[in-house]
Amino acid sequence: MSSPAVLNVPEHMVSVRLKISALWIAMLFLFAYGDIFGFFVPGRLDELAEGEISGIEITQGFLLAVSIYVAIASAMVFLTLVLRRVLNRWINLVLPCLYAISIVASVIGEDHAYFFFLSAAEIVLLATIARYAWTWPVEDPASQQR
């Protein structure tokens, strides 16, 4: 019995742009689920009701900063598909490093297994984004169009 054709797509048939864009999407899902699961941590809703999260006061500035943090990653889903290859490559090398640093910083003081797991998974996805950006071939057909 042969496996479905969708599982046998040659590596060169999927552009680097699509791979990186899909990785950004996957990372955003992990961000969202990590935040959602956080609501189930005992005492977390009480902490939020008091205007605090993990010892940080929830202010307009805090919410704006978090919104920008998520918006940048969200924009990368699209920007990866449309930016010129050279700029795209460098942005997809730098941003994953910055996000990985922020994720490692957010783990400090955490004691929930789900948070460690999701953080590790996010870092793996970010490392994969950086790897694809680093090894992005010049002759990638999708890159030649931009």
Image (cartoon, rainbow, N blue to C red):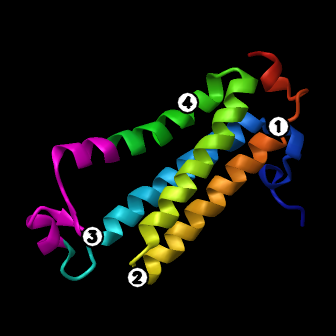
Q: In the image, which is nearer the foreground, mark 3 or mark 2?
A: 3
Residue placed farthest to the left in the image?
Answer: 50
Along the viewing direction, whichever of 19 and 50 lies nearer the viewer: 50
Q: Are marks 1 and 4 in contact (CB under 8 Å)?
A: no
Q: CA distance from mark 4 to mark 3?
A: 32 Å
Query: Above or below — where is 124 with respect to 68?
Result: below
Residue neighbourhood size for the residue with mark 3, other residues' Cα within 10 Å, grouped as few (<14), some (14–19), many (≥20)? few
Which residue was labeled with disc 1?
Answer: 136
Residue neighbourhood size for the residue with mark 4, other residues' Cα within 10 Å, grouped as few (<14), some (14–19), many (≥20)? some
Label whose residue precedes the other's in the sequence (2 or 4): 4
Name the amino acid type tagged 3.
Ser
Label whose residue precedes the other's in the sequence (1 or 3): 3
Name the amino acid type tagged 2.
His
Q: Which residues are magenta?
A: 45-66
Which residue was labeled with disc 2?
Answer: 112
* Residue depicted at x 63% and y 57%: 125
Q: Quadrant of residue 20?
A: top right
Name the amino acid type tagged 4.
Phe
Q: Is residue 11 left or right of residue 102?
A: right
Residue 71 pos. (x, y %): 41, 38
Residue 54: mark in rendering? 3
Label whose residue precedes the other's in the sequence (4 or 3): 3
Label whose residue precedes the other's in the sequence (3 or 2): 3
Which residue was labeled with disc 4?
Answer: 78
Q: CA distance from mark 2 to mark 1?
A: 36 Å
